[in-house]
Image (cartoon, rainbow, N blue to C red):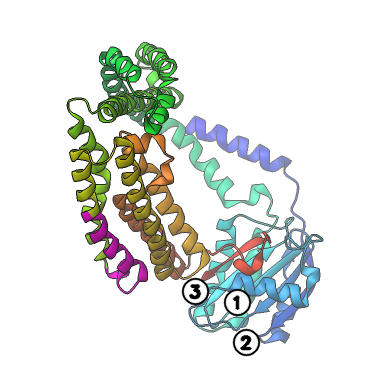
Amino acid sequence: MKKILGILLLALMAMLGTAPAAMAAPVTDVIVEDTAGVLYQPQLVEAVADINFYEPTKVAIVTIEGDVGGDRLNADVLELARSQHPEWLSNDKQKWADGLFIFAVDPISRKVGSYMGEDRKVSLSKQESIQEATKDLFREAQWTDGTIAGIKKGAALINQPWYRSAGFIITTSIVGVLALLGIGTTAAVRAGNRKKAAEHLKRGDAGYSSVSLALDVTELNAKTIPDSSSYGTLVLEKYRNFSTRYHEAGTLNQQCHAFTKKELSKAANVKVVARYADLAEELDGLDDVIADTNTLLNRYAGWEGAWDRQARPLREDLEQLPTLLSQPEAKGLPTTAALSSLHTQSSQGLQQLAADFHSGAITPDAAMDQLRDMGQELSALLQQHSEAMIGKYTKNKTERNAMEKAMESSRRSESHGRQSTILGSVYAWNTFYPVHAFSAGYVSGTSKVDTARSSASSGGSSTGYGSSGGSFSGSGSSSSF
């Protein structure tokens, strides 16, 4: 170990010996916009003028008198620049001007921010370091001293030479130790990959075996599906490339079983096994749909069970709806009342539809149309309810976007469960909105928002310039103190 560390030390000394000397560059200009009236400018300007950056830098100091609990410092600084200091912006007005460092503080909302031109920008972690250098002083309302501390920290980090980076020194110091210890990371990753591959292979073999055993029956079912039925036609469209995809699954089956233990340790090969498993499961679901379509449309023996399988998703949605509507967040919303009314109406309607279909009062196609329409009506109202619930829970556009993405992701993933039904297989994933997908997405979305709020309240960084910022993407962020 001593020998290796000695070699690393010699290498470090050699690199430092060839590194250029850091040049001290004075501040080229100091602009103060103390709109909050909290700075003692004689002390501030003199102190900032004596600070050296690594490159000639113009320093702008801004104080904003915002709102208690507000989070608009980024947007407020941009608005001030646009209205009073357009020279702080790049020629295309989309970023901060080169050579510029802006330091800002809002003593009311207790936010501190740092912003810089593209030739002065630093990582988010370094922006956080600049802001952290001020917080103890700002918490004691020492606005001038805190501002000076922040600018000094900015000068130390902006355009910092690589060999003065704390990360470089630390990394160089520990790399030899990590190399010796090995820490088993690579072995753990490989073992994890093999475990995932085994799980995918088990899943894929089960689906592939089921499809293979039913291959002749699936072909026979497809041949007797009436193409005069609109649903029969749609399912037959799905069947047209069934043989091709089954052949693809067979090729993947052979490839996956030929992988050695070493090969299954690689992430790329795990993806191949996952693709095999997904394809096999999809085909296994499709042959069930083909069987149900044939049985249902021709009213062959067992058609009652086939109908129950088609109606089950809607029936389960209606059973889960009261729990969803009883959530405290749902109280008082117009969509809650509308969904409650639809629940009663659709529960009765589904019973009547089943009775009509069983008695032969309506055709299979007409029954499927009504089932589809009921599902779409519920889905449309659930989407409106989603928007209402999101609007009630969130406080800004960023939070809304986070919840919308979480709920859409849940809806997309949960929709795969309906692909084993006729309606689920022939319509796009977003045609129906499963109630359990709504519930899971709402929990996930509110969790993301709560985490972000907790981070913000504990000083986490806020990037972006709000809806008023438009396409502006200048480097910078703010955090709480």
Asked if the stretch drawn in magenta spans residue 341, the answer is: yes
- Kindly identify which residue carries mark 3: 481
Give the residue displayed 45% in from the left and 36% down from the top. 177
Q: Residues within 10 Å of mark 3 (few under 14, many from 20)?
A: many
- Residue at 50% x, 30% y: name it: 3
Q: Tell me where the magenta segment starts and ends, as one range.
A: 328-348
**Dot 2: within a 10 Å radius of its alpha carbon, few (fewer than 14), some, or many (20 or more) residues?**
some
Q: Position of residue 282 (x, y in %)?
A: 36, 28
Q: Is residue 146 magenta?
A: no
Amino acid of disc 3: Phe
Closest to the observer, 81 or 336: 336
- Dot 1 amino acid type: Val
Residue identified by numbered label 2 = 38
Q: Is residue 217 something that shows in the picture? A: yes
Q: CA distance from mark 1 to mark 3?
A: 10 Å
Q: Secondary structure at mark 3?
A: loop
Residue at mark 1: 105
Q: Is residue 185 left or right of residue 7?
A: left
Query: Label 3, label 2: how many angstroms apart (C-alpha)?
Result: 16 Å
- Work out whether residue 358 or residue 478 is closer to the camera in this orientation and state it: 358
Bin the neighbour count of mark 1 within 10 Å (Cα to Cα): few under 14, some 14-19, many 20 and up.
many
* Local secondary structure at mark 1: strand
* For residue 368, above or below residue 345: above
Secondary structure, mark 2, is: loop
Residue at the image point whose x is 32% and y is 46% from the top: 370
